[in-house]
Amino acid sequence: MSRIPALLGGSPVRQSPFPAYPVLGNEEREAVLEVLKEGRLSTFTASPGEYFSGGKRIKAFESEFAAFHRVKHAVAFNSATAALHSAVVALGIEPGQEIITSPYTFTSSATCALMHNAIPVFADVERDTFCLDPVSVRKAITPLTRAIIPVHLFGHPAAMDSIMEMAREHNLKVIEDCAQAPGALYKEQRVGTIGDCGVFSFQESKNIMTGEGGMLITNIDDVAEIARLVRNHGEAIADAMQERSYASEILGYNYRMTEFEAALGRVQLSHLEEWNAVRQKLAAHLSKELREIPGILPPAVSKEATHVYYVYPFLFDENRAGIPRDLFAAALQAEGIPVGVGYVRPLYFSPIFQNRRTFAFKHYQGNARYTPGLCPVAEDLHFRKLLLFPVVRPPATLDDMNDILTAVKKTIDAREALLTKTTSPPGK
């Protein structure tokens, strides 16, 4: 192997792409073909003899997902965003009230509040787990606060004991955003089962996927009932033989899952623990080697948690490593190693918050702030410290992880050459 970095003209470590994701096999293909053969693709109908709650695969997926989590109810949606919005409605959050969440997450963890004219309030995150910092959450509570949305980011559970303690103390609802952490454990309890409800994503990059799709789980009957109404135009049919009246009980939407997605989801769910175990094995192999390299800090796993590594996040100290983060990442990418620089900008930097562009703010009486510097840890992670390997997942192997390690060591060893070449004046 060439010791010259690929960024400087050497041969890259990786000559071929990493294995494709998602993992799709004959089981998934056969499940989808069965739906096509039957010719019933949505099945949210209300003809006599059928409930207005989805087809047989949707109901089976919900039942199996509830059983996996040992909860009473699972409600399938066409996305986790839709499920989050429905959770806000189902838990009785009212317009103008506040929901505390993380700024370092996908946008819908916060915009689900705006969808119901509630107001997101951002608390900072912990530097080691990247999840909500309970100390910052406590400081963010106001008389208008009604709920907390902890995000189990990158597959690591948030500090749920502290969050639930604050929720009980202030009579707050808790919606767990489990989009990146299906199957993760907090003190031997599955995420999503600790708060009032949990929401999962099945978008095609997730640990299990249906292309798009989501699920809400809960043990609260009323929450499940309202979520089903929100999912399906606000319409309710109580009796198996009741004709559809088109009379809406509440404002609802078309957030319905299809039989295709449910068919895929049932197969994928059956492999979740197996595939999570592969992620954990690959991540452990990387962490063992990377922690020996100055300037690289592998992801922390708290003693209460089981991590399921939606991606592999790590901290980079460019002073100790002797090379700037962006140059290090560019060198790895040239070696054929996919790497992300940061995750998403803290959400309050987005124009929708900076300019308060939604109706939710029109009559808001609180003091939610969205100024730069609001969450210094999240900003430091994004702009200076965090890197991500997105390929630490099946069907990748330990050999694939060794290519990552080889490229990292090659880049660190060549940092002086990289620095000299990339900082030389033009023509030198």
Image (spheres, helix red, strand yellow):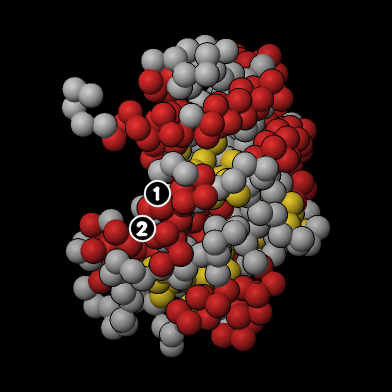
Q: Which residue is mark 1?
A: 344
Residue at x 42% of width, y 59% of height: 380
Residue 103 is drawn in which quadrant?
A: bottom left
Question: Do tag 2 and tag 1 residues touch (Cβ < 8 Å)?
Answer: yes
Please rate how many residues cluster around mark 2, counting C-alpha atoms within 10 Å: few if below 14, some from 14 to 19, many from 20: many
**208 displayed left or right of 68:** left
Classify the position of the N terminus by image quarter.
top right
Residue 110 is drawn in which quadrant?
A: bottom left
Q: Name which residue type carries label 1.
A: Val
**Farthest residue, direction front:** 428
Residue at x 55% of width, y 64% of height: 126
**243 displayed left or right of 160:** left
Q: Name which residue type carries label 2.
A: Leu
Q: Nearer the viewer, residue 412 or 58?
A: 412
Residue at x 71% of width, y 25% of height: 398
Residue at x 77% of width, y 46% of height: 68
Can residue 228 be seen here? no
Query: Element at badge 1?
Result: loop
Q: Which residue is mark 2?
A: 347
Q: Is residue 314 above or below residue 202?
A: below
Query: Element at badge 2?
Result: helix
Residue 28, percent from left and from top: 65, 20
Q: Nearer the viewer, residue 315 or 397?
A: 315
Q: Is residue 295 above or below residue 362?
A: above
